[in-house]
Amino acid sequence: MLLKSISRHKQTILYGLSMAALLVLLRWLQLRLIILEHAFELYAAAIAIIFTALGIWLALRLTKPKVRTVIVEKPVYLEKEIPATPPFQLNEKALNQSGISKRELEVLQLIAEGCSNQEIADRLFVSLNTVKTHSSNLFVKLDVKRRIQAIEKAKQLNIIQ
């Protein structure tokens, strides 16, 4: 019972013991007559240093987050089978209506994969300016302003997977 109480209030007990030790240290300094000539300055400096160090130590102890990560592994049982998705079929009609060229379609597919303009240029062996031109042409043809919008619209039209 006593051990549980001590472990529960460990920080409070340590703080109290450190304060008592500081008081004993200050009394010892006063009794040894070390601070007779420059009493106020040394006494104030000692108190400032001790309490600054104690404040830093206490702040570090109290502000440290106590995060505990628990990993729970459980088996997952599927009650019914997930139906297979039908294979992707390119919508040729929407592709022809939008006027997207084969090279622009390749750029669009690489954009959908999350490639940057430089990565697309490297994969297709073209310059960065060519990729930017194809991208801006895609935006105009799909009537969008951003890459994400172009991907969403192309998926809706079944132009890309």
Image (cartoon, rainbow, N blue to C red):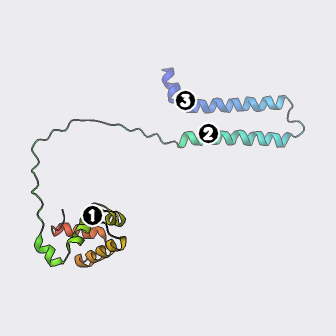
| Residue sitting at the far right | 37
Within 10 angstroms of label 1, few (less than 14), some, or many (20 or more) residues?
Answer: some
Which circle, 3 or 2, is nearer the viewer?
2
Which element carries disc 1, helix, strand or loop?
helix
According to the image, label 2 marks what residue?
Answer: 57
- Between 47 and 110, the residue placed more toward the observer is 110
Task: Tell me, for residue 110, which label it has, or none.
Answer: 1
- Between 75 and 149, the residue placed more toward the observer is 149
Mark nearer the N terminus (2 vs 1): 2
Q: Residue at x 87, y 31 (%)?
A: 33
Task: Tell me, for residue 62, which label it has, or none.
Answer: none
Which circle, 3 or 1, is nearer the viewer?
1
- Between 84 and 14, the residue placed more toward the observer is 84
Q: Is residue 48 left or right of residue 88?
A: right
Task: Tell me, for residue 10, which label it has, or none.
Answer: 3
Q: Is residue 159 left or right of residue 132?
A: left
Q: Is residue 32 left or right of residue 135?
A: right
Q: Is residue 70 above or below residue 3?
A: below
Task: Give the Cα separation between the discs numbered 2 and 1.
Answer: 53 Å
| Residue type at numbered disc 3 | Lys
Which element carries disc 3, helix, strand or loop?
helix
